[in-house]
Amino acid sequence: MPGHSHSSFVVIPAVELPPWSLFGLAEDFARMQILLSVFDGDPDKWLTQINMHGGPELDRDVDFLREVRQRLEADPSFLDDMRRILREFADRVTS
């Protein structure tokens, strides 16, 4: 349209996901933020806290932390990538 600027964007094809998988994605996003900001990216620090104070309601956190450990063994730059992604997300949301 004349007089209007167009911003570029990427169209991502729709993917049908069960509703509970979206909650899991949001939970893991929050868990990653907690891991990086509260525990400085150290899954063992968080696991220690869970072992000292946690209960069965934290089993999903334990599963997440075990998965992070496995990813770190396979890819030592994994947490650096996650820090960058979360920083970019925060910059886009707050700007």
Image: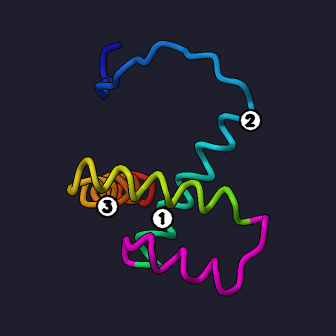
Disc sitting over residue 20 in the figure: 2
Disc sitting over residue 14 in the figure: none
In-image side of 43 versus 30 (left or right): left
Disc sitting over residue 33 in the figure: 1
Give the residue drawn at x 35%, y 58%.
Answer: 91
According to the picture, the residue beneath numbered tag 3 turns out to be 83
Q: Earlier in the sequence, mark 2 or mark 3?
A: 2
At label 2, counting other C-alpha atoms closer than 10 Å, the crowd grade (few under 14, some 14-19, many 20 or more) is few
> Please, what secondary structure does the residue beneath circle 1 have?
helix
Q: Quadrant of the N terminus?
A: top left
Q: Is residue 86 magenta?
A: no
Give the residue drawn at x 38%, y 52%.
Answer: 70
Q: How far is the residue under mark 2 from the one under mark 1?
A: 20 Å
Q: Which amino acid type is shown beneath numbered disc 1?
A: Gln
At label 3, counting other C-alpha atoms closer than 10 Å, the crowd grade (few under 14, some 14-19, many 20 or more) is some
Above or below for 91 versus 23: below
Above or below for 40 versus 67: below
- Range drawn in magenta: 40-57
Give the residue drawn at x 78%, y 66%.
Answer: 56
Q: Is residue 45 magenta?
A: yes
Q: How far is the residue under mark 2 from the one under mark 3?
A: 25 Å
Q: Position of residue 94 (x, y in %)?
A: 43, 60
Q: Nearer the viewer, residue 10 or 60?
A: 60
